[in-house]
Image: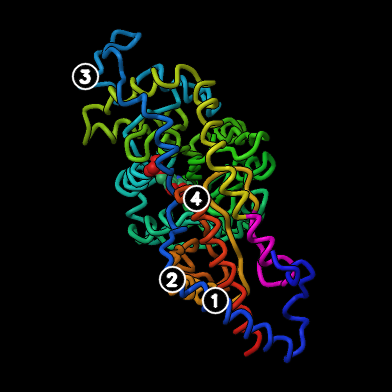
Amino acid sequence: MTQENTAAQPLADRTPEDLQAFLAEQRTAYDDLAGRDLKLDLTRGKPSSEQLDLSNALLDLPSEYVDAHGVDTRNYGGLQGLEDLRAMFADLLWVEPAQVVAGGSSSLVMMREVLTDLWLKGAVDGVRPWGQEEKVTFICPVPGYDRHFTLLEWFGIETVTVPMNEDGPDAEEVARIAGSDPSVKGMWMVPTYSNPSGAVATQEVSARLAAMDTAAPDFKILWDNAYAFHHLTEDEAKSADILSLAAAAGHPHRPIMFASTSKITFAGAGVAFLAGSLETVKWYVDNLGQGSIGPDKLNQLRHLEFFGSPEGVREHMRKHREIIAPKFDIVDRVLTEQLDGLGIATWTRPSGGYFVSLDVLDGTAGRVVELTREAGVALTPAGSAFPGKDDPRDRNLRIAPTFPGPDEVQAAMEVLTACVRLAAAEKLAG
Ligand code: PLP
């Protein structure tokens, strides 16, 4: 940290001469970094090899292939997934085992299946398939997960955005939109340590979403709890019990919950889960049966043996935390050292999940990405966390620090913050 930054004066308050001097300084600093021939990457929201190594014992499991209920996991059948693995994750997700499906390796695939089923067959509480509606619209809290948005685009579903606040989506705004337009059929929701801001939806926000009146009778909350257990501190956030909240409010079929072990064991070879009302589970499994005779139960049994109990999952996640929390600390330290006080950036300090969301000076996010690329640091394209990749303020950037090593995170963050300063100085100095 340079002394100059600790006593930083907001750029907007500086005289034109001071700004020009600051700009010249930033150009020199940037040219120096750009000349170092770096090759760094902050785009990949995936586990590092060290994290994957934590689960290598899976490679020698299962030790037997018949489960505790006599199911031969080598064979076809059991579309809903192995009973004991469903019970383990039901415990972790605070739902009943009968409300859980243990599926293949990707929850995103399950989300696509659910949307396809809604599109072709309609919801358990719907009047007609969504594909027969004149228009279908989804509420998207922003910033959010890019693949949620591209999936909607693929269906031709329209999007309307609401702000993602620290306590979850702006619930009053969601209720206003969902209550007034019957084409609004659902919303995305990453309730715990959201991608990318790390926000955790409070009980109050969740209860409001569960209970609100919606113009569409078959309104769905696609409750993507991808980071339910991915704590970065000892203060482990608890996800709201959305299925009970919705059932108590008279909307039992509204939420459909998703989770997976992609960032617990192996990304691409884990187990994904869906949970909902008993009717929703039956609807999903019946539709699934049109294209499947059963999931990979050997992999499910392998995971069951590996974890042993719900506590085994929690314990395993603490090992992940030890590896990745220091990387998040580096991100926050460099951001603070280099940007605090300049009035050109704000960022999140997540207590879980995989990302830090950085807001730079309005109108400069695209320029920052361009500058970092030229200096050898890959960043997720500006606007990625918005439907249509359209960030109206061109200010949001997503930082993914889990995959690179700590030294690489440090070096990449130094480049990124230098670019944020330079882009802001360019803009303010005209
Ligand atoms: N949901 C969210 C919010 C994610 O961030 C990700 C991956 O980054 C996924 C889902 C993907 O989940 P899966 O690997 O189970 O398909």
Secondary structure state at the residue bearing disc 3: loop
N-terminal-most mark, 2 or 4: 4
Q: Using a 10 Å C-alpha cutoff, classify the residue at mark 1 as few (fewer than 14 neighbours), some (14 to 19) or many (20 or more).
A: many
N-terminal-most mark, 1 or 4: 1
Q: CA distance from mark 4 to mark 3?
A: 36 Å
Residue 98: % across, % down: 44, 21
Front position in the image: 11 or 53: 53
N-terminal-most mark, 4 or 3: 3
Instruction: Name the amino acid, label 4.
Output: Trp
Label 4 CB less than 8 angstroms from ligand 1: no
N-terminal-most mark, 3 or 2: 3
**250 relative to 135 in the view: left or right:** right
Q: Which residue is depicted at the point 32% across and 47% down? A: 116
The total number of labels drawn is 4
Q: Which region is colored magenta?
A: 332-348
Label 2 CB less than 8 angstroms from ligand 1: no
Q: Which residue is mark 3?
A: 74
Is residue 265 a member of the stretch shown in magenta? no
Q: Which residue is depicted at the point 42% across and 53% down? A: 44
Q: Which residue is mark 4?
A: 188
Residue 199: % across, % down: 62, 49
**205 relative to 30 in the view: left or right:** right
Instruction: Name the amino acid, label 2.
Output: Arg
Q: Which residue is mark 1?
A: 30
Instruction: Name the amino acid, label 1.
Output: Tyr
Q: Which mark is residue 108?
A: none
Q: Which mark is residue 373?
A: 2
Secondary structure state at the residue bearing disc 1: helix
Of badges 1 and 4, the one in the foreground is: 1
Is residue 339 a member of the stretch shown in magenta? yes
On-image quarter of the C terminus: bottom right
Instruction: Name the amino acid, label 3.
Output: Arg
